[in-house]
Image (tube, coloured by chain):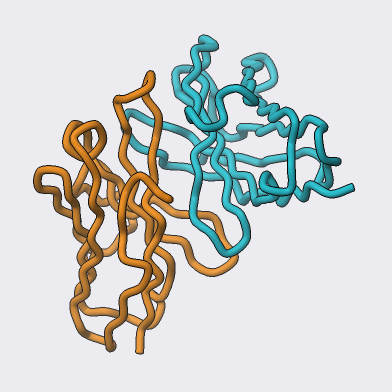
Amino acid sequence: QVQLQESGPGLVKPSETLSLTCTVSGGSISSYYWSWIRQPAGKGLEWIGRIYTSGSTNYNPSLKSRVTMSVDTSKNQFSLKLSSVTAADTAVYYCARDRYGYTDIWGQGTMVTVSS
Amino acid sequence: QSVLTQPPSASGTPGQRVTISCSGSSSNIGSNTVNWYQQLPGTAPKLLIYSNNQRPSGVPDRFSGSKSGTSASLAISGLQSEDEADYYCAAWDDSLNGHWVFGGGTKLTVL
């Protein structure tokens, strides 16, 4: 059974870069899209972007200028970098598998706080 | 402001049938299928309905989805207390190189 686990710093300073990694276990990372989605406390879901195992990406237009995603198939991992963060980027960040028109498997989420 | 529009809240008593609506546009719901997610308090979202009306394995048939034009609906029949959760609709939007869009979420309360 495929499982996803997010990892990375829980605290990031304003103006710095948020970096998260998602490790895929129980299955291969190949031949799927992999998404990042975030959720500020008490608010709804916001899709950040996705990456295919070939490296092809789609990003949320509102975040595109600050987002970079990468994939490491040898480690079964994919990553998110969000630059120039502010308090508005404080949220729970989820990684998820994007499969043929729907997102079917989600990680448990990791809380990231932007604060000095 | 979410691209897909959902009512912020819904409620029902045990055994009742409730519906949650999701309104979009021609570039998202009008062109692509709709998915629904259930988020129980303190947990990650869970896929509830995909491709408008398909249930993943393990999802009770009390949950059903439909789509017409640029709108979609989630129906829950035989409401149970454990259905109290937040529900989100999602669809792929073909504009601006393509991206997923979500509804703002509907908090379902079982009275």
Instruction: Out of A54 and B100, give the one closest to the viewer.
Output: B100
- In the rendered image, the residue lying farthest to the top is A54
**Measured from the top left, where is residue A96 in percent x and y?**
52, 38
**Measured from the top left, where is residue A110 in percent x and y?**
69, 48
- In the rendered image, the residue lying farthest to the right is A116
Which quadrant: the C terminus of chain B? bottom left
Residue at 90 percent of width and 47 percent of height = A116
Instruction: Out of A66 and B82, give the one closest to the viewer.
Output: A66
Instruction: Out of A76 and A58, give the one closest to the viewer.
Output: A58
Q: Which chain is cyan?
A: A
- In the rendered image, the residue lying farthest to the left is B68
Q: Is residue B99 above or below residue B103?
A: above
**Measured from the top left, where is residue A72 in percent x and y?**
66, 16
Residue at 31 percent of width and 59 percent of height = B6
Residue A116 visible in image? yes
Q: Which chain is orange?
A: B
